[in-house]
Every structure is written in C-alpha cells, then in structure tokens.
Amino acid sequence: MSVFGNIFKKKSPQLDEALSFAPIVADMHSHLLPGIDDGSVDMENSIELISVLHSMGYKKLITTPHIFWDMYKNTTEIIREKEALVQAELKVRGIDVEFQAAAEYYVDEHFEELIAKDDILSFGDKHVLFELSFDTEQINYKRAVFNLQLNGYKPILAHPERYEYWHGNFAKYEDVADRGILIQINTNCLTGHYGPGVKRISERLIEADLVDFIGTDTHHVGHLNLLEAMRRSPLLKKLVESGRLLNSTLK
C-alpha cells in the first residue's frame, strides 16, 4: 500500500467538497522535483506527492526547488531538465494537473550574480520566490530585491513567519510590504507545527492583510498529513474567503 494510503480514510463526500483546496487553485511553493534538494527523493515520490496535492483540489502546482549555492547548486538547466521528466511522467500516468518549475532562491552572493545576468526562474507575472536565513537577519536582501524589481520582477518573500528574529518587531513585516515585496506564508504554519510563536505571527499577518500568497512548502508525506488537518482550519477558510490571496491569478 502507498505511504499515502492512510491520508484519506472515512470522509464523507460533503466533507471533501467543503474542505477542498480548489479555491486556492495554485500552489506556488513546494519541492517536488526528484533528487535535487531536500524534497522528493525520486520520481515515484514526486508522482505520489503531486497526486495527493491534486486530489486535495489544486489545479496547478508550481514547484520551487532550492537554489542555495552552499547546499543545493541547482541551475536553470538542471531544473528545466527535471521539470520535463516529471511532466512526461504525469502525461504517461494520465494525471491531469498543470505542473511547472521555478525556484526558491536563497539570498546570497550567487543569487545576486544570477540577478545581474538575468538568469532567473520566475512564474506567473514575473514572480520570483526568495527566502532568507532562518538563523541570522540579513540586510543584503534589500539590495537584491531592489535589483530584481529594477529588472521587472515581482519578489515574493517565502515563509517570513518562520524568521523568528523578526517576531519581536512586527514593523519588519510591514517594511517588507512597503517595499513592494509580496508575502507568502506556509499553510502548515497555521497548525502550530513550527511552534506557537510562528503560528501567532502567521495569524497576525493574516489579520493585518499582509498575506498575498499561501504555499504548502511540501517536501514529504509528513507535510501532506499536516495539510489534511488544515482543511478543517477556520483561519485558513477566512483567508481563502477574504479574496486577498493571489494564488488564483497564477492560472
């Protein structure tokens, strides 16, 4: 039996319909390409993760492997090659979901070099997903983001609710928005999976209308189990019904 066999037990059709992720339309943060970062380990794993996300209601999956030069030396060519392999396998298996690859860029010297060369993987309307260090506040991200914007890109900051060095100063998040940077939170942060502080900041970002995108950040089956629990979240329902989320514009 698939490792995903226990995820969808004993649910009524009405419950499935009520809690579908379909209104979100597109997931724009995940790690579903096989064997190139800390996400999917092989093609079979990729297909199973994609299949479950599709069954939850997502119509489009924009996967974003890490480009973090000290750990994951992925390039546009590597990512495009893996993207084509997954797309071909989905077609063979008759899985009717739109699948696209971009990247999650870590702000470092290599990222700034890629911006200077305009070697950037974007999605939607020239959107670019980037992340910061989880441990140490980075000031250089402002320069990198400014240069991205000069090149016509629309930067999206990945999971800022997890940057605990900002938790004591909510103005940091407001400054991000004021700079024209879009904000993406992780769906699973609303479960408390990353701790109560992260959950509180996620809730505050929602209440302040600062959340532009929500992403699953799926790496493995454990994240899918958490997503399943989130289908019952009143806070997620409120966010989806607010009309603020831009995920559906990525169709």
Image: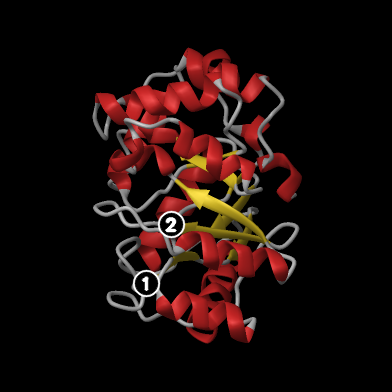
In the displayed structure image, the side of residue 12 where residue 151 appears, left or right = right
The residue indicated by pointer 2 is 131
Against 152, is 193 above or below?
A: above
Question: Which amino acid type is shown beneath numbered disc 2?
Answer: Glu
Helix, strand, or loop for circle 1? loop
Q: Position of residue 109 (x, y in %)?
A: 41, 78
**Label 1, residues with CA under 10 Å away: few <14, some 14-19, many ≥20:** some
Asked if 80 appears above or below 247 in the picture, the reply is below
Q: Which of 133 and 195 is in front in this view?
A: 133
Where residue 207 sits: x, y (%)?
A: 54, 18
Q: In the rendered picture of this protein, how many numbered marks are placed on residues?
A: 2
Mark 2 residue element: strand
Query: Looking at the picture, which amino acid does disc 1 mark?
Result: Phe
Q: Is residue 214 at all visible to an observer of this figure?
A: no
Residue 80: image x %, image y %? 56, 79
Q: In this view, does 156 lie to the left or right of 42?
A: right
Q: Residue at x 54, y 44 (%)?
A: 176
Q: Which residue is drawn at 72% across and 25% down?
A: 243
Label ID, residue 68: 1
Q: In which quarter of the image is residue 123?
A: bottom right
